[in-house]
Image (cartoon, grey):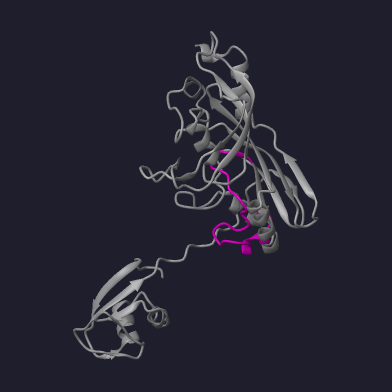
Amino acid sequence: MAGVTAGPITLTATHTDRLDKVVAALLPTLSRSAVQRLIAQGRVRVDAISRDADYRVQPGQTIVVDLPAPAPEAPQAEPIVLDIVYEDASVIVINKPAGMVVHPGPGNPSGTIVNAVLAYAPEVQTVGDVQRPGIVHRLDKDTSGLLLIARHEAALRALQSQFKARTIRKTYLALCVGRVSPEHGVISRPIGRDPSNRRRMAVIPGGREAVTEYVVIEVFGPDDRLPAAYALVRAHPLTGRTHQLRVHFASIGHPIVGDALYGMRKDQLTRSLRPRHMLHASELAFISPASGREVKLHAPLPLDMRRVLEELSSPSSLDQ
């Protein structure tokens, strides 16, 4: 309903007529058919009572019209180049770059993975949620790596079932602050919305089950050049909670390098190299709904993460 603001609007009838005609006259931005739909939905009340469209309104009566929020516009196709790692008749797997949002939302109306996918595979438009067509799972804006897209509704349902059964295996590489101990471990801590900051998630009593397996691949420092230690970790989230790896590693005192929301803002490496959070979805294994066979995929570390690891492995500007 363009041109009107969502929420209740209070009107005063100025003449006798049918309810739908009176409201249409008092709210000229709405067509009479739109007014009739609102009346049928119970969104129009006369003196606090819902009335039919043909109710005869009298001058001076109070009419409250509860206008719904406008339906969000469907994402539009945009010719954006995608790094496609794998595709078949049921799925597309993309190597998402850091800094690219998966689907449109507040502050990111375009330029997303969804906009790009709609240009590449228009059939995805009718799959799943209108604002997130084809999206089976999500990656944070600054997380790079493998992202799974369903090409049709049956594929979406099949992949969602695999996620629910925990048969899809996702592997991430994360660079964490500190020497993570033990070197092989499981973090099992419930995650929910942080009650003190709605932008964040947190480990909280009563949160949703969240389980992460991990193994430390390599440790850097501490030494004469690196006063602090860093650990490159391979992590397997067994559940799919929002920000799960970022929250879990921060909760054990080892936030992911570059994570401004959950991490250490004054970490030496972050100050020197100013990286995004160092998290990459490196491996993905699932059963293709098209073939019934397992697909195993790998996305190499992107250049920015390789550069950070090179800086940690050899003398560099970190000393200066």
> Residue 128, position in %: x, y?
60, 62
The secondary structure that most of the magenta stretch takes on is: loop
Image quadrant assignment for residue 33: bottom left
* Residue at 50% from the left image edge and 43% from the top image edge: 190
Q: Judge whether residue 147 is colored magenta.
A: no
Q: Nearer the viewer, residue 172 or 163?
A: 163
State left or right for residue 15 relative to residue 122: left
Residue closest to the eye, 200 or 202: 202
Q: Is residue 224 left or right of residue 31?
A: right
Query: Residue at image x 35%, y 42%?
Result: 196
The residue furthest left is 60
Q: Residue 79, percent across and down?
A: 63, 51
Q: Say which residue appears at 49% left-offset and 49% top-offset.
A: 108
Instruction: Indicate whether 36 appears above or below 213.
Output: below
Residue 306, placed above or below residue 284: above
- Magenta stretch: give its range: 119-145
Image quadrant of residue 218? top right
> Observer-nearest residue: 284 or 66?
284
